[in-house]
Amino acid sequence: MRTVRKHVTAIGLIAVALWTAGCSGTTNTPASADTGPIQVWTMEDSTSFTALMQDFTKQTGIQVQVQAVPWANVNDKLTTAVASGNGPDVMQIGLSLLPTFQSAGALLDLSPYVKDHAGLQSSNYLSAVAADKINPKGKVLSVPWVSDVRVLFYRSDILGAAGISSPPATWTEFHDDAAKLAQRGKGKYGYYIPQWDSALPVEFTWEAGGDVLDANGKVTFDTPQFKSAADYYISFYKDRLVPTASDFDQTQGFVSGTAPMVISGPYLAAGIKGVAPQLNGKWNVAPLPRNQAGTSLFAGSNMGVWAKSKHVAASLRLLDYLGQSSAQVSWFKAANELPTAKAALGDSAVTGDPMVKVYSNQLQDAKLLPLVPKWDKISSAMLDALNSIVLKGNDEAATLAKLNSTVSSLQS
Amino acid sequence: MTATAARREAPPRRVTLRRTWLPSRLAPYAFVAPALVCLVTFSVVSIFVAAVVSLTNLDISGLADFSQVRFIGLGNYQALFGDPAFWEALGNTAFFVILGVPILVIGSLSIAIGLNYSRSWVFRALRTFYFVPAITAIVAISLIWGNLYNSQFGLLNWLLSLAGLGPVPWLTDPTIAKFSVALVAIWRGSGLDTIIFLAALQAIPPEYYEAAAIDGAREWRQIFSITLPLMRFAIFFVTVTALIGWMQFFDEPYVLTQGGPVHATTSMSLYIYQQGFRYNAFAFASAASIVLFAIIAVVTAAQLRSRRGDDG
């Protein structure tokens, strides 16, 4: 009896597999027979995503099971999934983790399916996340989903009281304004540098007109532009314009006015609105201060299909759906995360808010951090070097020279 | 059956049972077998696996596709000894051991002797009070201490400001952070060691103290001539476990500082964790864990040896 049931199951599975394979291979796939259920890993909050999925299920008949993964556990989840071979069907991948997911072989190459799924086509998306920038050559391992960009947050009331009528637009103005604000008294600062933020020195390098990737695609900090970025970073500490405490709370510092200027992403706006609604109208956002350029960090998440997914056709339909402007706009309304689709960014629901306008303008001039597998290690070495200069008083030239040799040995 | 008959029959039956069921020579092995099986599967085998992995280049792509894994000899060890962060972690661990072990052992011993003075309800309540940190979840501890230590809104700095003293960067200054983190660990670890010492203290027959008192020995004399010598084994046990615990120091820096600022509180275990689970450098982390294992094994063996000399 048991063997019979096993045979039936096996035949059923083979049939489904053949069917799925057949469907995904053919050119037109009207209402795929693959109705899931597909498993989706999203980041942090699953309630809003589950609500979005109800609309998807209504349109396609595909059942979706959403599991929220906390950012801190993503790597553990990934290694367990890779080691065991049991993963979800679709997963959200933070751009900083993309190289790890790619080198783990966790993602299915979507390039054969792109032409049949409008939502997968690179031309829909912002140029910072064009297919050739987020994928190894000739492959499509993931598609853009949400974006996030760094802008300057400032307390207009405090800046005004200090005689600063408009937010700083250049590096010099930024440093001068921070100095003015730090003169307000003991325990007051002009700006706040998060000590864990390895992206900031890279942004400064871009703004100085350089890059941290050389012509061969290797990370290098041995450039005059990185040197000026490092000098600029150090100058805020040397002139005591930023707090040195590593446990300084960014939101708290901004709300209390201790650090009335910070460089952060839209999530900080949500945090401020949540903690201090009474500050409404007393703060604003502006594009990053420029040196040679005003380039910011492009962060966010992609969506990819697990390499061993048994529901490829259904997963592709989900990716296609999420790439549509309508889904991205409703996600923006539900979760306040910025779209990556150009059409969605032009939608009146998004452009209506003047702050969002600043974000979406800055998104046009934003770049990704280097997508190399060792970036995490390299960037912590870079951050450690800079922080040992500003916090421990290590010699700048010697520390940076040592950083350069560490970085090249990490990539040899 | 009468009582006498039962008594007459019982002894031979017991003997036959013992003979047929298990030869007495093997009985001890049968009793240790379950523990031994667990030890071998979960410790010896994993140490062996780590030793093998430490000679390869296993990372996350190797985990996905084993054909990419290569033996690279002692390359990981070479890279490890060339990594200044490794030496810093080793130095930090040595600092924590040298600071933590004596304070923990002497501190819990003093607390235990103090608590042993009386059996009144105050002392019993105090006993609970000292044991509470040992059974409190580390996450709760980190939340509370993190808030006490916080440089912006922490309670400690607020109290200092009331006394007219400036703020102390408890967790944000590389040197002070080492002490702050160690303090939490000592506070948390002292509860269990105090209980062990208290149990050993209560096992000392009171007659010894009475005899000593009759002979005119004072409090300090009694502590040094009766209490401490009779607690030698408890002190030895606590020292060995404390030493191993501090060499594997992990929880407090992990939750309070994540090893920062600038690696100042990164212990060996935290270094291994970061290499393995943050950078997915599994083979490199294995090499580091084998080194830590060797250090702990050597130190513990040396301690056991010194104890043997002590007895003989």
Image (cartoon, coloured by chain):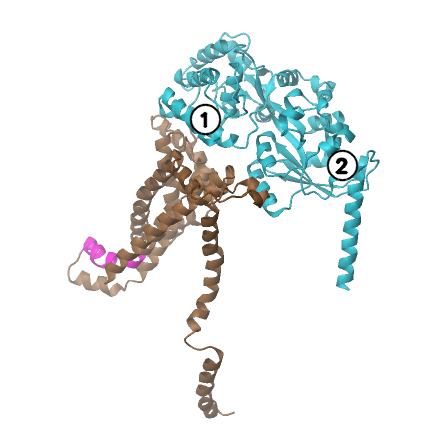
Residue at x 47%, y 12% (from the top left corner): A175
Mark on residue B225? none
From the viewer's perspective, is residue B223 above or below residue A167? below
- For disc 1, the neighbor class at 10 Å (few under 14, some 14 to 19, many from 20) is many
Q: Which chain gets the cyan colouring? A: A
Q: Position of residue A124 (x, y in %)?
A: 72, 23
The percent coordinates of residue A391 (x first, y second) are 39, 25
Image disc number at residue A54:
2
Q: Is residue B226 magenta?
A: yes
Q: Position of residue A84 (x, y in %)?
A: 61, 47
Q: Chain of mark 2?
A: A
**Label 2 to label 1: alpha-carbon separation:** 44 Å
Q: Quadrant of residue A336?
A: top right
Query: Can the viewer see residue A246?
Result: no
What's the amino acid at mark 1? Met
**Which chain is mark 1 on?**
A
At a point 25% along the width and 56% down the height, the residue shown is B228
Q: Nearer the viewer, mark 2 or mark 1?
A: 1
Q: Which residue is mark 1?
A: A382
Left or right of A411: which side holds B174? left
Residue B244: % across, % down = 37, 49
On screen, residue B159 versus residue A202, left or right, reads: left
Which residue is situated farthest in the left direction here? B216
Residue B127 inside the magenta-drawn segment: no
Of helix, strand and loop, which one carries label 2? helix
Q: Colour of chain B?
A: brown
Q: Which residue is pictured at 28% across the width and 62% down the height?
A: B204
Q: Earlier in the sequence, mark 2 or mark 1?
A: 2
Task: State the residue in front, B62 or A154.
Answer: B62
Q: Which portion, as a residue range, is magenta? A: B218-234
